[in-house]
């Protein structure tokens, strides 16, 4: 655990300890904080790794920033819980999710240019050109239902995990570092009708394996956000963000954040909420930001070879046989962007590789500017 004096000497913003050893967060924002008038320097002084729009930015980026300014922003200290043991064992045994190719893998140094990589674990996109330091994407949580062919007695519905990451391409070599911000969802067949369970958000930092001989990586750090604010339900949006932050002593820290928007637009499936909401949900409630900061592994360079927007089939990752992908409303990452050392936005999924599942034809993937759309297509 770093002491307060050391932290003050290393960063231009304050950090405070969380309930988990070696993991930190930022203090609450002052009551008079005004996001609309805050400069880049002011944002950084409060530990907000948010980027104000600049001249030439896309209309979508400007609109997202203006919405956040109009609705306001609040922060909340996370209460952290260890990753489920099954998730830790899964990562240690099978290696991390990523473009594990069933055909030619994307080359390590080039842009996708419309190419397709095959994976037995996941679908989505990655951009593999450059040295990346941050990635972001906003995902609307889906509704799930039993697929049209139904579930047999010996079958289960696969859990799904949406994440943004720094470094997913590294699974193709031994230099594997992957920082992820994730949110999972699964079909609850115990309710009538079956409903969607949204798992608590979690973050992971995977590093080259030195412990398990049959895995490419192992968990260096990670936790679940045990106190997510209201809003982690189907139909609402969560902005996922990962970044590397350099301390003044040269060490590299990882940051992961989750911005909960509290909105429930009209969706194809009716909302079935797991609990009664004690407060109104919608534009009147300011979005809530939950952030964590953690010191990185010794010797880490502080840059990633790819930025990733992924929907992961957790049944494949964890080796669960006879699991069926549930039908899901489209899962779309919007404002999907990455930045390099200069801080300028340069990473866009439209320049990257499409990643398709090889073990079934359950989903299609479409890339557009700042957008990755994953659509259920059937068994």
Image (spheres, rainbow, N blue to C red):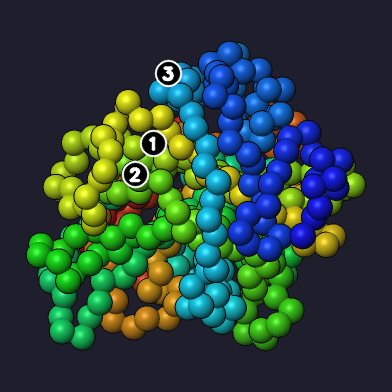
Nearer to us in this view, 312 or 224: 224
Task: Name above or below for residue 293 compared with residue 265.
Answer: below
Q: Which residue is mark 2?
A: 231
Nearer to us in this view, 38 or 298: 38
Q: Alpha-carbon distance for marks 1 and 3? A: 12 Å
Q: Quadrant of the N terminus?
A: bottom right
- The residue sitting at 43% across, 51% down in the picture is 228
Q: Quadrant of residue 18?
A: bottom right
- The residue sitting at 46% across, 37% down in the picture is 288
First of labels 1, 3 by sequence position? 3
* Left/right of residue 236 with respect to residue 88 in the rendered view: left
Q: Quadrant of residue 120?
A: bottom left
In the image, which disc is placed on residue 16?
Answer: none
Q: Quadrant of the C terminus?
A: bottom left
Q: Does residue 264 appear anywhere in the picture?
A: yes
Q: Residues within 10 Å of mark 3 (few under 14, many from 20)?
A: few
Task: Name above or below for residue 155 compared with residue 63.
Answer: below
Residue 258 placement (x, y as % from top left): 50, 45
Q: Which residue is mark 3?
A: 70
Q: Residues within 10 Å of mark 2 (few under 14, many from 20)?
A: many
Q: Do the residues bearing badges 1 and 2 touch, measured as CB atoms within 8 Å?
A: yes
**Secondary structure state at the residue bearing disc 1:** loop
């Amino acid at each position: 655990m770093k002491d307060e004096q050391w932290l003050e000497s290393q960063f231009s913003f304050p950090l405070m300890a969380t309930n988990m050893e070696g993991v930190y967060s930022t203090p609450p924002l002052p009551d008079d904080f005004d996001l609309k008038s805050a400069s880049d320097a002011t944002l950084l002084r409060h530990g907000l790794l948010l980027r104000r729009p600049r001249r030439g930015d896309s209309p979508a980026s400007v609109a997202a920033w203006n919405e956040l300014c109009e609705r306001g922003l609040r922060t909340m200290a996370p209460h952290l819980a260890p990753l489920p043991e099954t998730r830790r064992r899964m990562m240690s045994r099978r290696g991390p999710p990523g473009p594990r190719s069933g055909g030619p893998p994307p080359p390590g140094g080039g842009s996708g240019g419309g190419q397709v990589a095959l994976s037995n674990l996941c679908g989505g996109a990655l951009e593999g050109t450059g040295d990346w330091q941050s990635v972001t994407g906003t995902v609307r949580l889906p509704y799930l239902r039993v697929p049209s062919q139904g579930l047999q007695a010996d079958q289960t519905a696969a859990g799904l995990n949406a994440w943004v990451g720094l470094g997913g391409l590294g699974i193709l070599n031994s230099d594997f570092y992957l920082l992820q911000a994730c949110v999972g969802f699964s079909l609850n067949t115990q309710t009538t009708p079956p409903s969607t369970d949204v798992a608590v958000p979690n973050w992971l930092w995977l590093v080259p394996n030195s412990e398990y001989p049959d895995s490419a990586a192992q968990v260096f750090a990670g936790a679940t956000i045990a106190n997510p604010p209201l809003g982690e339900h189907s139909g609402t949006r969560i902005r996922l963000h990962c970044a590397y932050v350099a301390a003044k002593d040269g060490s590299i820290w990882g940051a992961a954040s989750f911005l909960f928007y509290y909105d429930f637009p009209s969706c194809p499936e009716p909302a079935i909420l797991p609990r009664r909401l004690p407060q109104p949900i919608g534009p009147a409630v300011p979005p809530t930001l939950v952030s964590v900061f953690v010191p990185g592994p010794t010797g880490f360079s502080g840059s990633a070879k790819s930025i990733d927007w992924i929907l992961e089939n957790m049944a494949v990752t964890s080796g669960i046989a006879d699991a069926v992908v549930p039908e899901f409303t489209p899962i779309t990452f919007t404002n999907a962007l990455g930045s390099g050392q200069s801080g300028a936005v340069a990473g866009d999924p439209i320049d990257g590789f499409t990643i398709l599942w090889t073990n079934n034809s359950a989903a299609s993937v479409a890339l557009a500017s700042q957008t990755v759309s994953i659509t259920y297509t059937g068994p």
